[in-house]
Image (cartoon, grey):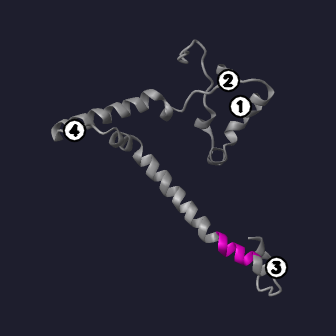
Amino acid sequence: MDSGKGNTEKRKNPRETTNIFSALTFVWTLPIFWEGKKRDLEQEDLYQPLNEHRSNILGDRFEKCWREEEEKSKKRKRKPSLLKVIVRVFGLDIMILGFVLAVIEIGLKVSQPLLLGYFIRYFTNEKSITKDEAYL
């Protein structure tokens, strides 16, 4: 199996220099999709991974946490827990993402019925809502 360490230099990842709009909408991925539409993609067409996604960085973090867990488990005379290591390495990222998604989900769940009520009220004969409010 090819380890990916051949003599071909991969292209720089466009995600590293993208703006917030492009990152949120994944517009930065369009060039490789267009290329893939024209022809089959080859290994050389792929981008370099982002620095934070490189296996050596994640592996080093994981190894450090695993060694700490082994030391703690020896002191407490128990088996080391892989789950605790995974939570230490990735837990903060997952919690932040979960919090952001929860805020978005709650905001949508609360706003949908309110906006639907305004929308229905506009199309009834009451006309208590102006045209500008309906466009919101």
The numbered disc on residue 32 is 1
Foreground mark, 3 or 1? 3
Q: Which residue is mark 4?
A: 73
Q: Which mark is residue 45?
A: 2
Specify which label sits upstream in the sequence, 2 or 4.
2
Q: Which residues are magenta?
A: 112-119
Q: Position of residue 5 (x, y in %)?
A: 53, 16
* Dot 3 or dot 1, earlier in sequence: 1
Q: Is residue 87 above or below residue 39?
A: below
Residue at the spot x=53%, y=62% of the render?
103
Residue 110 on image: x %, y %? 60, 71
Query: In the rendered image of this protein, does residue 13 appear above or below residue 132?
Result: above
28 with respect to 130 (left or right): left
Name which of mark 2 and mark 1 comes first in the sequence. Answer: 1
Q: Amino acid at mark 3?
A: Phe
Upstream in sequence: badge 4 or badge 1: 1
Q: Are the residues tagged 2 and 3 within 8 Å (C-beta)?
A: no
Q: Nearer the viewer, mark 2 or mark 4?
A: 4
Report the amino acid beneath label 4: Ser
Label 4 environment density (alpha carbons within 10 Å; few <14, some 14–19, many ≥20): some
Q: Secondary structure at mark 4?
A: helix
Q: Amino acid at mark 1?
A: Ile
Of helix, strand and loop, which one carries label 1?
A: helix
* Mark number displayed over residue 107: none
Report whether 103 appears left or right of 128: left
Q: Are marks 3 and 1 in contact (CB under 8 Å)?
A: no
**Tag 2 near tag 1, CB within 8 Å:** yes
Q: Does the rendering let one see residue 29?
A: yes
Q: Nearer the viewer, mark 2 or mark 3?
A: 3
- In the picture, measured across the screen, residue 87 lies left or right of residue 25, that is left
- Residue drawn at (30%, 39%) of the image: 81
- Label 3, on which residue? 123
